Image (spheres, grey):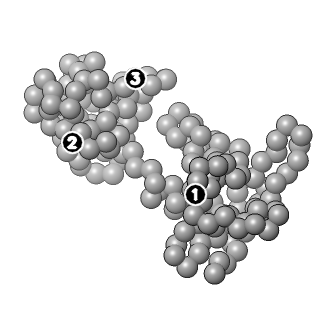
Amino acid sequence: MTKAVSENTSRTDQASSTQHFSLARDSFGRLVLTGADGIAHEGVVPVRAFPISSPNTGLAIMSADGHELAWVDDPAALPADVAALIAEELSRREFMPEIRAIVSVSSYITPSTWNVETDRGSASFVLAGEEHIRRLAGGMLLIADSHGVHFLIRDPKSLDRASRKILDRFL
């Protein structure tokens, strides 16, 4: 049984038509999208179009089998209750701590253990190889640890001098 939360405008496509949907949680805690046609889709998942470079624009709501059911150009324009459901679901799905400082590195050859300060607290991870540090647009860096967790450095130039010196050895 689902309880409807809100109805909103999700996308204006090239033909300028508007699609309405409601979003709710079922008794199992899964998101349920009910389209303007009245069809309920259980187990939907919100997915950001550009989670790193532009996390606040472009959001798709995908069916359990991977089909796009709704598109939201501006998630900030959603009603507060729908935005809260989507934000809660995204926080469960997306985990990408931002590195604020590199405290220490066990070795300058890989694999090496990194101790860092992130926006979510202290963390320690193993960098398996230098190829796991990827450069992104705008100078950002994405570091994947040996368990597949991604750490983001949004602006390497904003790190303290000691952190930049450590990082330079791997780039």
Secondary structure under the numbered disc 1 in the rendered image: loop
- The residue indicated by pointer 2 is 125
How far apart marks 3 and 2 lie (CA) works out to 19 Å
Question: Image height check: is 29 above or below 148?
Answer: below
Picture quadrant of residue 125: top left
Dot 1 amino acid type:
Ala
Does 88 sit left or right of 129 as displayed?
A: right
Residue farthest to the left?
106
Which residue position is annotated with label 1?
64
The residue carrying pointer 3 sits among few (fewer than 14), some (14 to 19) or many (20 or more) residues within 10 Å by Cα, namely few
**Amino acid at the residue labelled 2:** Phe
61 lies above or below 118: below
Q: Residues within 10 Å of mark 2 (few under 14, many from 20)?
A: some
The picture quadrant where one finds residue 170 is: top left
SS of the residue at dot 3? Answer: strand
**Label 1 near label 2: C-beta < 8 Å?**
no
Q: Could you say which is closer to the camera, residue 119 or residue 73? A: 73
Residue 70 x/y as whole percent: 71, 52
Amino acid, disc 3: Arg
Q: CA distance from mark 2 to mark 1?
A: 32 Å
Query: What is the number of the mark on residue 135?
Result: 3
Who's the residue at 64% across and 49% down the image? 67
